[in-house]
Image (cartoon, grey):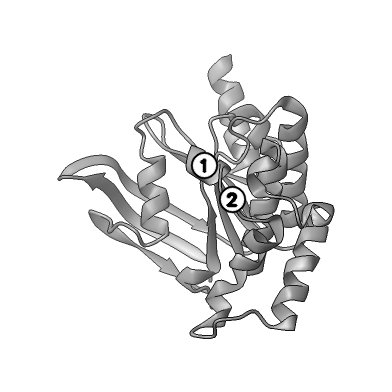
Amino acid sequence: MALLTASDLSLGYDGKVIAEKLNFSVSSGDYLCIIGANGSGKTTLMKTILHLKEPLKGQIQMGEGLCKNEIEYLPQQSLVQKDFPASVREIVLSGCQGRCGLRPFYTGKEKELALENMQRMGVESLANRCFRELSGGQQQRVLLARALCATKKMLFLDEPVAGLDPDATEKMYDLIARLNREGITILMISHDRDTALQYASHVLQLGENPFFGTKAVYLQGQRREAK
């Protein structure tokens, strides 16, 4: 069974349907790129998958032992988030909060996990730096390290390279691809379709020409339309 399956899904708000009859699935190890024009329902789909919004119709089922709190979400950064006055270590450690329950402290094991993920993302040397002093690319790597403290199964990324320069963008895509190769399932919303598709295994396109399938099949269809 897939990690996540959407069946006959209709999305919208205030009674207005913005996407309907969506059927797709995400299996362990997939890298799903979600694309579509503004207003096509990408954000609403994201909220539905994260159980922040109910679908108008249909359902999303989780399988293979996936729980909703094991889908870690990395949103687009707001100005408030970019100016957050905490150290890199504190931010990465906060990804372990879901493990703490009512316990008001982090265990040695959780601190080791935070260090391990800072090393994975190449930000261990920044551990004592204030988050708001970092570059955009460094901040995104810190937030990825935080997300990895929260889940080992699935990351949902919303425009993770927005606002980054070309060099930082390339490094971020490479990091995400590496995490996928290490077994983490990736769902990514992207306006940078061509670059994102270089890494994706599957494509979900919302809007006038909806599509779900492998990247290979999607690109074949694009080539036929271009002739």
Residue at the location (56% across, 42% down)? Answer: 83
The amino acid type of the residue labelled 1 equals: Gln
Taking the image as drawn, is residue 178 in sight? yes
Residue 149 horizontal side relative to residue 177, left or right: left
Residue 106: x and y, percent? 64, 79
Foreground: disc 1 or disc 2: 2
Q: Nearer the viewer, residue 154 or 194?
A: 154
Image disc number at residue 195: none
Q: Residues within 10 Å of mark 1 (few under 14, many from 20)?
A: some
Residue at the location (77% across, 57% down)? Answer: 127
Q: Residues within 10 Å of mark 2 (few under 14, many from 20)?
A: some
Residue 35 horizontal side relative to residue 198, left or right: left
Q: Nearer the viewer, residue 87 or 197?
A: 87
Residue 26 horizontal side relative to residue 139, left or right: left
Q: What residue did someone put label 1 on?
A: 76
Residue 57: x and y, percent? 24, 56
Q: Quadrant location of residue 29? A: bottom right
Label 1 or label 2, whichever comes before in sequence order: 1
The amino acid type of the residue labelled 2 equals: Pro
Q: What residue did someone put label 2 on?
A: 85
Taking the image as drawn, is residue 220 in sight? no
